[in-house]
Each structure stands twice: as structure tokens, then as C-alpha cells.
Amino acid sequence: MSAADPATFRWDVARRARTGLPEVAYAEGKSIAQLVHVFRVWQGHGAPGLATRVRPEQAAALVAAFPAIVSDALARTATLPARDPDREFPACAGDVVVVCAGTSDLAVAHEALATARFLGLSATLVADVGVAGLDRLLAVRDRLTRADVIVCVAGMEGALPSVVAGLVRAPVVAVPTSVGYGASLLGVTPLLAMLTSCAPGVVVVNIDNGFGAACAAWRILHAGRPRPEPA
Amino acid sequence: MSAADPATFRWDVARRARTGLPEVAYAEGKSIAQLVHVFRVWQGHGAPGLATRVRPEQAAALVAAFPAIVSDALARTATLPARDPDREFPACAGDVVVVCAGTSDLAVAHEALATARFLGLSATLVADVGVAGLDRLLAVRDRLTRADVIVCVAGMEGALPSVVAGLVRAPVVAVPTSVGYGASLLGVTPLLAMLTSCAPGVVVVNIDNGFGAACAAWRILHAGRPRPEPA
Amino acid sequence: MSAADPATFRWDVARRARTGLPEVAYAEGKSIAQLVHVFRVWQGHGAPGLATRVRPEQAAALVAAFPAIVSDALARTATLPARDPDREFPACAGDVVVVCAGTSDLAVAHEALATARFLGLSATLVADVGVAGLDRLLAVRDRLTRADVIVCVAGMEGALPSVVAGLVRAPVVAVPTSVGYGASLLGVTPLLAMLTSCAPGVVVVNIDNGFGAACAAWRILHAGRPRPEPA
Amino acid sequence: MSAADPATFRWDVARRARTGLPEVAYAEGKSIAQLVHVFRVWQGHGAPGLATRVRPEQAAALVAAFPAIVSDALARTATLPARDPDREFPACAGDVVVVCAGTSDLAVAHEALATARFLGLSATLVADVGVAGLDRLLAVRDRLTRADVIVCVAGMEGALPSVVAGLVRAPVVAVPTSVGYGASLLGVTPLLAMLTSCAPGVVVVNIDNGFGAACAAWRILHAGRPRPEPA
Amino acid sequence: MSAADPATFRWDVARRARTGLPEVAYAEGKSIAQLVHVFRVWQGHGAPGLATRVRPEQAAALVAAFPAIVSDALARTATLPARDPDREFPACAGDVVVVCAGTSDLAVAHEALATARFLGLSATLVADVGVAGLDRLLAVRDRLTRADVIVCVAGMEGALPSVVAGLVRAPVVAVPTSVGYGASLLGVTPLLAMLTSCAPGVVVVNIDNGFGAACAAWRILHAGRPRPEPA
Amino acid sequence: MSAADPATFRWDVARRARTGLPEVAYAEGKSIAQLVHVFRVWQGHGAPGLATRVRPEQAAALVAAFPAIVSDALARTATLPARDPDREFPACAGDVVVVCAGTSDLAVAHEALATARFLGLSATLVADVGVAGLDRLLAVRDRLTRADVIVCVAGMEGALPSVVAGLVRAPVVAVPTSVGYGASLLGVTPLLAMLTSCAPGVVVVNIDNGFGAACAAWRILHAGRPRPEPA
Amino acid sequence: MSAADPATFRWDVARRARTGLPEVAYAEGKSIAQLVHVFRVWQGHGAPGLATRVRPEQAAALVAAFPAIVSDALARTATLPARDPDREFPACAGDVVVVCAGTSDLAVAHEALATARFLGLSATLVADVGVAGLDRLLAVRDRLTRADVIVCVAGMEGALPSVVAGLVRAPVVAVPTSVGYGASLLGVTPLLAMLTSCAPGVVVVNIDNGFGAACAAWRILHAGRPRPEPA
Amino acid sequence: MSAADPATFRWDVARRARTGLPEVAYAEGKSIAQLVHVFRVWQGHGAPGLATRVRPEQAAALVAAFPAIVSDALARTATLPARDPDREFPACAGDVVVVCAGTSDLAVAHEALATARFLGLSATLVADVGVAGLDRLLAVRDRLTRADVIVCVAGMEGALPSVVAGLVRAPVVAVPTSVGYGASLLGVTPLLAMLTSCAPGVVVVNIDNGFGAACAAWRILHAGRPRPEPA
């Protein structure tokens, strides 16, 4: 979308038909006029809409312009239900658990939750289970074992995905966060740690990318299944 | 497993029961005596066995000791069928496509293929589809669209997963390779590129980690399904 | 140019005679007084002038001081036509196409466009052609094939130059942008990706350096041609 | 090309038609059987062939198999003339000067020279002109000024392209080399230095990538010209 | 010690008096003549001696020269008992547990064990307790809880110290190892992960530095105690 | 603790029983409401409380809410005495010396001091002893020699721990600080320097982590001693 | 100097006697009260005083408190003449030339100039001699050849010291600056380039460290000379 | 000098006249034929010659070809006295002390010594004075104080220059070495530490660059003196 002129925005209409996932708006660096324009285009098509990394003043302006928009302050998302119910994402049976360790990972975890729910997934948060308090993690072991996909959000040393993936069969999508200071290198340390996990089959997305993890969960839960939804 | 004394090897017998995936042997840095010991333990349990990063002399010694072992020189793997057929990995209906661009990615792609097949998955290779020859990639577009999981192996600038994930609904597990020189930084460049893919839902594993990508594919294809196999 | 005192500015008068390209002003960190002084010197010589990375308040002050200055808010440039028409850059027949993928690359793309036009080049923008939406890129394939020089601007994984250079004969000047977060490392990731492109003959300039890419295009389009313009 | 089996090699026949530049063989990591196979395919099509990074034993085997192959030990290249003269690269009028500073840059400079000549370009070497001996550089200033494209090869601090680009109008393609020790970081230091050159319009390729620089020179010298050669 | 001439070796005789810990020999890069000379000096003073990173041929030569030397092939150490029993390190009551996860960490773990025992400490190895098999770690939880100092050796994602330090009161000295490939960056990844541990009070030594960890354990177990041994 | 809702805070009540060290609050990124809530929970249990990295406005609000809280502006800590005296940390006999070199390290040194005292340790500051003024360091040599644990705080080249550890028997916990500019890389340089110290037995914590160093000192001084305090 | 309390400042009185260079105040992060206190101590001893990195409001407060202080806004320094003329630095015969390339290096160059003059050196600025305009550099070649010490300040690719050191016999102290963007990595690129200079005998100081370069010049010009000044 | 053909070697005859320092041969990567050729050219001019980083077999061949060559195995240098005594470097009165800490730094220290003596300087080695054994350093304090220039060679944490420069007035040229493992990052850690030294006026050269340090010492000792020697 052009930063210069909202009117230059060309929506990749065919993306959802190709990949199942629609184009969304990354709000960082966009003007309010641009964001409003994008949601207007989506509304015009009857399609649902999602913006991520929405700052409070952007959220306020969007809600003022579109009363149907739901703004999630913690997740920093804004979602617009589809005007055309057939365009809404159909509910998916899979059970996504978003697990995180500490306070600072909550914003990213909530971005994953909000995105997953926008995409029709059923998603639950399990927080406060850092590896330094193993008893709390073991207390939710059954909940994790029942999950179909686990999104595992952690900063600092990023050890949580290794421990979780050693306990369950489900795919584990690891999301490093930029939480921490000094040697955490703005999230590069948990990123590297997750990539070198000793638990086989852990997969990783970019730092703070809760949105991407939810998209991966959507792809995973639709793997090997017929296409139910329209373009 | 102890590098000092094969007898100190303690097999994590319960891992497969917990996670579906068994412990395997990473042959780099192991002596032939150690490798033989590990396969003997597995054989004693009737379980199937897999070793990765097997050098030619290790492979020869393993085949001499266990005629049933199948050695794949390109994938650098050695696999032992289960003595007890009930311990074999049941065939999985999903369709895994391993796609790679150039010559140098083939060893990693074959490690993914061999691991996937060891785990009971059906896996196919689509090679020679680098992004600088887009016509060749578009020629296999239908094949990619039909896949249930795509493992996408690429070195150098690591652009292939972005292009592929923009064409399909399936989960895309990206594997950066250490192919290239200079600014490819032994695979760090494609790793970073894949993590910052503009296509939503791409997930990434460690550099050259074909094994891990196949494990991720296994987890993905079993997500939301009942557990069919024994501990 | 001295930051302390505009009067210490010594214009490299001979640079255009030596290299065809004149000294320009990089506005970042310069005071308004300094910028005004520089344009005054240029105007005194009858020469055209260009400033890059001009902030809004700098642009306003320059336009107030020199009504002939054209300020481009998106490109962050200010250009002063030559008082002496013989000093203007002669129009060049070549066809420069500036291609970029997403919203966030537009400022850099427009810096390239504005610089190219200042130097007498004919330059066109082709936006919204990220590699995750290959169909949109293929839709402009003919336009790219006709270009004499392509300036390819991309952030995140920086894959666009590889795909474009595999489709055309023209020189491809790749400009990485600092767009993205986390593993994009402020533009270092697309920079490294472009340098390791699997498409032969891609050349790269510094992160966000739209100005430098346009200068390279000027050098390329004048390669092997007689010198038409005065010192 | 498959490392496993020469027969899996699929030549991107259409690449030259699309981009003007043919697929070549990067010999590093290829077996002699694979290299021989590739040249045989090229010979079968009547096309010319080029391999880079050829080790002495590979070169000897290639020359034994194809007496027409010319091996350049310093450039580490092997070139096969086209059996079909119409497939040969037509001579190009442009004047390419490959300039380098010290001994250690010579292998990379010669790779650029050999590639350029394979592509039909006229290319000359100007060596021993490091910036610490400015008088020697100034002694060849006229030669540099007459060049249509300059390929500038330098290791260590990589300062040569900045100095050269401040003296000439021609495009300057900078090639950092892995020459040096300690803080030269295997070529990363000259790479970064060239990217931040204070001379506008310097473009950069990967470390030690003489081949890529010559391809860029070919693209530059054909910019804005009709296509003379067949697919 | 001079690499040129064994005779230039000047033993820091006073180090043990100052710090409790004697000078030892780091064998990497030393000739056999030099190593023999150093042990001769120590023997002449009646002092015990330790060499680390001893290669097999160095070990063989040392044992041939000093039959009393004990060589540990896995730890890569050589130790000479004190000729003067008063110079021997007195036994220390503390209980050091060296815990590690996988095969590849064993050499470093054994260097810590051998150094600890040379210094008079009582040290035990607990291996095979990687965080991906949490049950095995929990099985030794009591053993860890009883330890006075824990040396925690881990490569790859380096998560073990975080988990262990969340279970026990003892000081945890974390030793990252260069085990792993790709994103483990030769041990830099577990090093960074251990430094950013979410468990308070974890301390870290250099990559593969089992020797340093044992020295730290010695310092810790003598903290706040009277000096028992002679200079 | 949830950033969204103070009420979601779940205190790891058992941590002190397991490890001797309680959960504390890292104030960075927490709202005043959250901080107040945490201290209320602690007060409700009769437990003492500590917050680190407290900004002035957070400190003022905490003191207003809990008059018993002691705020240390230089250390950026807030401490709440235990309502239940049995929950207070018992005084520990050991002698902790926090030594630092320059002005800029003082905030980190004071965080170590405040944390140590909160944990019942006796801690003293020795400042202004940078290695470039060796005479000042030698003047306090006796004081250092008497210490049971030394916390050594340094920025820039981080040389102080090496010098100190060569003079004393006590454990040396090195804390790199983000003091310095340019090549100090925000504390990475002293971090690396401390990890490669030539003095055996130096251990290191994260950049600016005075809190962690004090926790390590607590663990060290309780090593090999019976547990005196209640959960 | 303590950040907490000016009174804790302990001046290293003996430093000038030991090394010839006095302790100075690095103003970044210091309060005005602290700065005033330091100058008061110096004034009390009759000694001259220097503060670097002084912000405008700090400078204003210092001049208000000490009318004799000279504030240099461009160099960001504040200097206090010695109350006791015998404590002033004696004039030194050597000729220091501070040479820099562009606008953005001027602040660092002036810090070097101001420090040099404070230390009694004779120092001259030669600006605007970047390597991309070689003619301007050659125009001052004679001036450079006459210098006794050259301080060479450059950002971006940092090539100036290599060119200058190839023209003169004098020691060349290179100062990289944080000028530039993207691949200049906040000054790391010119730092690395200067360290790998192909001109023998170039020495380097930290990024933006004009102060340190002047101190090095002082040491150089007093090398091998009797000590003229009092402690 | 051309690696391909010794005859292409063009000696920068004028370098010594310009800068006082002659061109020398860096033997790494040069053939014996090339080295012999270079010394022959020097001998033909009557000039003295120096090669650095000479491997044993290169040294043997050079001594066989030129009996006057002196080979220093530890320094890895080969020096040829001038056939024409007027071309020899005149003895310089200054006193250079090369100080180093440990065994592994000795090769670099000896390269500095051999180069310094080749250039006519008087140079002495002071070894075994690492900062972890401060008493040994203080024992040579007087020797250091008398030096005119100190070359300070250190690996690992690179703390020696900071300590030395705090004790003396002489210029301190710091040489980081690639000694150490893990976090020493092949010498990058001591390099960074030396650049951020808290002792003002420390200057730094590239990793392992004993040659460059000696050249810097030569420049320093000739600063402000008339030119005594011929071109």
C-alpha cells in the first residue's frame, strides 16, 4: 500500500484464493488515512479485515470510522468482521494453545491469539510457565498434550519450546520475543536458541511475530484437508 | 550417549511414547563402536533406527554389522527397519514435497526425504526450481499446490520459501543451507531471509537441518489426529 | 561542508567534470542555514542542486528561500533547477524502471526516482510486486523486460532482485531497505540476501540508498557514450 | 545439477534467451563426472561453456575429456568454445578495465577477466594500484578514464572503488576479496566499506565474486541496446 | 611459557599463595619439549601439575617421561601427583555435580571433573539429562538438590542451566559447549542463552571451558573459609 | 505477571522453598497498577518484596502506596520489608565486596548492593579502582583479599575482574556494563572480555545485571550449608 | 566520580605524574552538579580542567559557574585554564594536523583539536579532503607531509588514513566516526577498514574518539623526550 | 606482486622515499619462486628486504637462495641485509619495549621485534607479565617507564594495554592476538577491548599485526625529526 496516497493501494484480492490467508495491514508506519482506506476496500468487498501493530491513536480512529471494528489493546490488533458472512473464516476444529513464560511475552502471545481467532481457529492462552519454575509447566502438561498446535512464545534464553516439544506430539511453532536486555540482543538470542533446539521438529518464526505463528498454525490445521472456504 | 564408552548409552525409551518421534543418532563425532552399540540397542528392542550425518566409513561399518541397514550416501543417513513390525512407523496419508533449488542443496533435501520416509511419510523431491529461473518453478506449480506439507530447501539468498508460500495453502517448512560463499555467511543469510519472509506462515529450522524439517512435517501431518502407534 | 559555519563550505566544483555527477547535499544533520548556503552557492554558479533526506521543516525553509525549489515529501528530496540552462542535466534516452514490493519501500523508491529525474533520466515506478504475490510480478514482466536499467528496492528477505534478474537482460541495481523487524536487522538481511543472489549480475548499494542506485543508473546509461555535457 | 547423479542435470536452456547470460558451472563441490557431464550437454547443444572455481585436478580431467577446453589456472576457470559458431558470444565494443591493488586480489581479478572474455567483452587488467601508493594509481588515471566499465577488486580496507569512482564517469563494480586477516573478517570488511563508499554510484557484488562482476559488466554494456544474439 | 625455548618458562610460583589456584598448562599449541619442561619444573618444586587440552601424542610423551602422570583421554587432561604430599590439594568436603545433556558435551564435562578432582574437590557426573527429555532430569532432581555446586554443561540452545537453577539452591556454573551446527554458531548461542537465563543467579564461563568452571567451583567451596593449604 | 490485568499475576510461591531466592519484579515495562498489585500480594503473604529497574515515577507511586517501601534512586530498586519477621531473609555471615571502576558503573553496582542486602547479605562498595590507575586498586588489595565473594562491575574493556581474580581466592562474579561508546558495543565488549579472562575461575552474568550477580553471591555463600530459612 | 553524590569524587591526582595526562571528565550521563564539583576540585588544586561530550545546557551551567571556562560548541568541550600557571601544559613544538573528509566528521575532528590544544599541542584542521575528490587531497599534500603527527578522522568507508599514510612519514592516528547509515554500522565499518589498512603503521582509536586521538598525539610527541612538566 | 608470474612484480620503489617505510613481502599465499624473485629485485637495488609470515619451507628455500638472509623461525620473518650499506636503515636512538603476557602471544611479539630491528630500532622483549599476575608486571614497571614506545601484545581479554598505559607516558601500541578460544572470537574480543581502553591514548592495530605495530613505532620515533636516510 502506498504510503504517499491511500488511493494507490492495490489489494491482492487473489491471495486468499491462492493461499487461504488474506492480505492484512501492518500498521507500523501507516497513516490513519491509509489504514481507514484499506479497511474501506475490505468492507467494500464484504471481506473481513485485520490490522496488526496498531497504536492506540490508530485504534481509536479506526473504531470511530468503523464501529464494527474490534480493537485489542494488548494484542495491538484491530479486526473487522466480514460484512458478507460467507467471507468470514469458517471455524476450524483444531485446538491451538499459545503458551508463554513471562509478563513481557504477553503482547506477542495476544497477537498470536487475536490472529488465530480472526482466522477461525480456536485458541487458548497458557501463561506464566517459564522453565525456571518447572512445577508450573508440569501442572499444565495435560493441557499441552491435548493441543493440536502449540505456539510457544518466549524471550530471554528461549528455552520453553525445547521443553514443551519434548513433552508433546503436536507441532511447536516457536516465537522468540525481544524481551530482555544485554545479551538477549533484542530477541536474537532466543531466536538462535529456538533454532538450535535439541527437541526435533521445533519450527521458528521471526522475533515478536505472533501474527506469523498464527498463520503457520492455520496452514498446519488445514494441511491435508479439502478447501472449505470461498476465495 | 557417552563418547567414552558405548555402554553408558541410555536410550530415551519413552520419547516416542511422549512425542511420537524416537531418539535418533547424530553420527558426527561418534565412533563406529558407539554407532554399532546404539543400533544394537534399538535392534534389541525391535525398534527401527536412524542415524544422520553418517560418513562413508561409518556407513560401511554399519552395513557390515547389520545387513538390514539401508545406507543413503547422498542423504548421509543409515536406517534399520524394525525387527518387530508393530514398531515400524505406520504409513501416513499426507503428501510431503521437498523442493530445492540447486545442486548444493541436494544433500540436505535428501536428508529430509530419508527422514520423512523413515517416519512413514510419503515424500517426493522437486529439484532445480531456483527463483532465478521462475519458469521452471511455475512449471511445477500444480504439484506444489497439491502438497500437504512443503519442505523448502535453499541456500544463498534463501528466496524460494517466500515465492512458494505465496502460491500454496500448505505449511512451508524452510531449511536454509550452508551453500554459498562470502556474504552467505555459512547459511546465516538464507536463515535470516527465511525468517523475514514476506509470505505469512513460513516456519524455519536450523541451517542444513533436513532431519528437523522432516520431523516438523511428521508433527504437522499428525496434528489433530488420534495416536495410531504404540510406545 | 562545515557544520559549524556555512561559510566553510567548499564546493567540489570539478566533480561533475571528472565524474559526470555533481556533489549533492545529504540533509541529515545539517542546519537550515547550511542548506540554504549550499543552494545559494549552487545558484550562484547557475548549477542545478539536489538535497536528499530532507525533513519537512528543512524543506519548508528551502522552498521559502528559493521559490524555484521543488520539494518531494515522499522522496524527502529538494531539487533546484539550474539558473543556467546549459548546466541542466541533458535528457538521457534510457528507460529506468524502479520496482518495489511493499509500502515501506516506497520512500526509498521515490528517492531513486527523484534523483534519476534530477540527473536527466527517464524513470518509472512499478510498485506492489512482492514475490509472495508472483502473479502481480508476472503481470508486469513485459514492462520489466523493456527496461534499460532496473532499480530493485526491497526490504525483509530481499528476494525481488533475484526473481527480476532471472527474467531480464537489463542491469539490476538492488537497494535493500531497513523495512521489517527482528531478524531483518535494520536492512542487513536483505543486503546480505541481495549480495548472495543466485541470479548472476545483480549489483547492490547500501541500505536505503535510493540516491546511490540512481547515480549507478546514470553511470550505466552513459557507459560507452561520448560526454555530452559541460563541466 | 544433482550431486548424486550426473544424469539428473537439467540445463536451464532458456536462461540465455531470457537474460542474455547462460547457466554456468560452479565447480566447488562437484565431482569430475558431474563436470564432464555438464560440458557434454553444452557441447551437444553446440553452446559455449564456462566453469568457475575449478581446482587443478578438475581442470586436468576436463582438458583430457575435451581438448578444446581452455583452462586458466590463475582464474580457476575452464572455458569451452561453442561448437556452433552462431552460439558463441558476439564481441562487444565496450572497454572493461579490471583494476586491482595487490597480489592476493589477482585470482579474483582473473576470474572477472576470464568471464568477461567468455561473454565476448574486451577486458584489460590494471594491477598493483593500491591506494597506499597513490602515485601508481594516478599514473593510470587516463587508462581508467577511458574505460566503459570498471571492475574494481580489493581486499583489506576496500578503499580502491571510492578513489576510482571519484576519478571517472564509468560504472564502477566493486568486488571485495577475502584477502587479509583479523579485522578483515574474510572479506566482510571491504564489503561493508565498498557499500558505504562516499563516491556516488559505486555498486557491489559478493566477496570474491569476479564472475558476478563480469556478468554485471555484460548487462551494463548491453543496457539500452538491441538483442543481437540467438537463444 | 616461551614457545621458542622451554628454558624461558617462568613459573608464577606465587599464584597459588595469592589465589589458591596454581598455574596450569594449556597444551594447545605447545611442543612436547615445552610440556615436559613445565612438568619438570613442577616436579622439581614438589608441586602437583595439570595440563589441559592434551592431544593423544602429547599425552603419550608425557606419560613416557613421567610414569606418575595420569592421562585422561576423554577429558584431554594430564595430571601429575605432588612429589611433596604437603603440596597436594587437600580434600574439600563440598559436593560438586557436573551435569550435562548429550554425548557431545561429555569431553567438556570430563575436563571439569578432572580439574575439580585435581583441586581436591569431590565431583560426580550426571549425564543424559537434556531438557527435551524432562522425565530423565526430574529423575535426578534429588541428586541435584543435594549438590553444593552444580557445573552445568550444555550446547545447542543451552537451556539446561535455566531449568536446573530453578530447581536448586546451589550455585550453578554454566558452561556452553561448541556442540551443534548452523545457528549454534560454535557455542555462541548457548553462551548467550545462559547469560540471559530467566533463573536468577546463574553464572557463566567461556565456551568449552570445563577447566574454568571447576576453578570457579573451587573458589565457591572455599568462600568464607580459612586458608588450609601452604603457598 | 500479566501486563494486561494485574489480577492475572500468579506468584511463584514455591520458588523460595525450592531455590532460596524469591520471585522479584522487573519494573521495566510494568504499569504502576501492576507493580502495586505485586507488592500487595507479597504483603498479603507477609513476605518481603523487591523490584528492580524502577523509574522515579514508579518509585514515588510505590512509596505512596506502601510507606514501608524503601526506594533507592541510584540502584533503581524498591524494597518492602517482610510484614512477618520470620519471612525476612536471615543475615548471612559472608562478606560481599562490590568493586567497580568508574562513575558509569555505579548504578549497576548499587543494584547489586541493594539486592544483596535485601537477601540478607553484608555488602560493601569499593569504587574508583579502574585498572588504568593501578595504585588505587593496590591500595584496596587487603580489603579485596578479605572478601568472601567479590562482585566486579566494569564497562569499556572490562579488565577489572582479571586483575582482581589474580589477587584473591574468593569467587569473582563479573558484571559487564553498557557503559562506553562505539566499540564497547553496548556492553558486549566487556562481556566478551570477562568471559575470556586469563584469570581462572572468573564467572560472568548478563550485561548490567547487578541483580543477578547478587543472587549468585547469595547462592555461593549458602553453598554447602544447611537451609536456615522457611519457605 | 560517583553519579550519586558529587562528594564521592576521588580525583586520581597522581595520574598526570605517572602518565603525563590528567584525568578528564566525560560529561555524558553526569549531572551539572557533578560537573561543577569536578571543576571545583581541579580549580582548588590550581590544575587545568577538561570536559568532553558536553551538552549545551551543561556548557552554559559550567560557564555560569566558572567564567574562565571556555566552551567549544562544535567540539562539545569545556576547558578551564590552570589557576596556577605552572600547572598549565607547556607548549609542545610538534605540529599536529587533524584531517577529515566530510561535514559529519567535523565534531569529532574539533574534539581532537580542542583536546590537543588543551594539552599544549599545536594543532591545525584540514577539512574537506575525502578520497572521492582526490584532487583536493593532493592539493594539501605538502601540508600533510610537513606534519609531525596526523589525526585522520573519517566515517563511511574510512579510506582516508590509508591514502594519507601512503603519502607521509608521520604517525597516522585514525579515528573512525559514526557518520553514515545502513552498512556503516554506526562506525564499525570505518573502524574495521582502518584496522585493515594496506598502509603500514596506521594506528586506530575507538569510534568518535577525538579525545583519545589527541592523547595519543601527545604521547607520540613526547616519546623519547625528557619530562618537562611538574606532577 | 603477481601470483601468476614473478616477472609481473612491480616494486613500489618510491615508497620509502615518500613514507620512510619500504614495501615488504607478506609471504602467506606466495610461491617460493615469487619470494625469491622479490628478494632478487631488492638485492639488485642494494636495498634491504623483509618478508613476514614465512613458513618453514619458504624460509629454507630463501636461505638456500640467499645465504645472507637471516630467518627467524619464531617471528616467521626473513630479512636480507642491504648490499649497499647506505641503503640500510640507520640506527634510531629510541627504546622500543615489546611487552606480552603469555606463551601464545610470543610469535606476534617476535614479529614486532624482528620488524623493529630491521627498521633500525632498538627493541627489547618483556614477556610473562599477564594482568592476572600483577606482581610480575609491577616488577618490570621501571623498565616500562623508561621505554620510548611500548608495543603491547595480548590475546584473550586484552587487558594489558590498559594497565600499562596507566603506568607510563610513552605511546602504547596495542596488538590483539588471535590466542584463545570460544568467546575470544579469534582475536576480535581483545581488539574491541583495546579500542575501548579506559586509559587515554592507547592506539590499536589489526589482530596479530606485530609488523604493523613496529612500523607504527618507527613512525612515532621519527615524528618531528629531520629525514636522515636516502630514498
Image: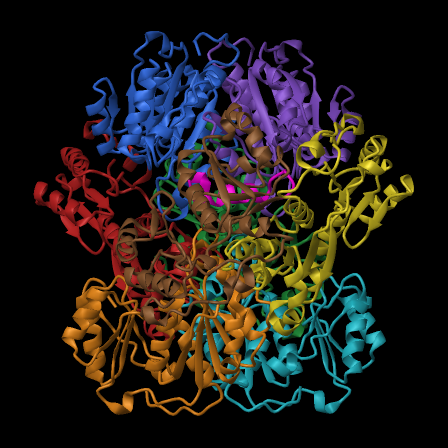
Chain colours: A green, B red, C cyan, D orange, E blue, F purple, G yellow, H brown
Q: Pick the residue in front: E159 or G185.
A: G185
Vertical relation: A43 (above or below) B75 = below
Q: Residue at x 18, y 36 (%)?
A: B42
Quadrant that contains the C terminus of chain E: top left
Q: Main secondary structure of the magenta part?
A: helix
Would residue A116 be counted in the magenta stretch?
Answer: no
Residue furthest to the front: H85
Please state the horizontal and vertical placement of residue B182, each as a whole percent of the image. Answer: 41, 60
Foreground: D222 or B217?
D222
Work out whether D54 lies above or below A174. below
Dividing the picture into quadrants, the one containing residue D70 is bottom left
Q: Is residue G179 left or right of residue C156?
A: right
Residue G8 relative to residue G132: left or right: right
**Which quadrant would the N terminus of chain E be assigned to in this image?**
top left
Whole-percent x, y for residue A157 in the image: 49, 38
Q: Quadrant of residue E2?
A: top left
Question: At which x and y percent is residue B112?
Answer: 28, 53
Give the total number of marks visible in the rendering.
Answer: 0
**Span colored in magenta:** H179-201
Place of residue E13 in the rendered image (x, y in percent of width and height, measured from the top left): 43, 19
Q: Is residue D208 visible?
A: no
Left or right, G140 with respect to D53, comes to right
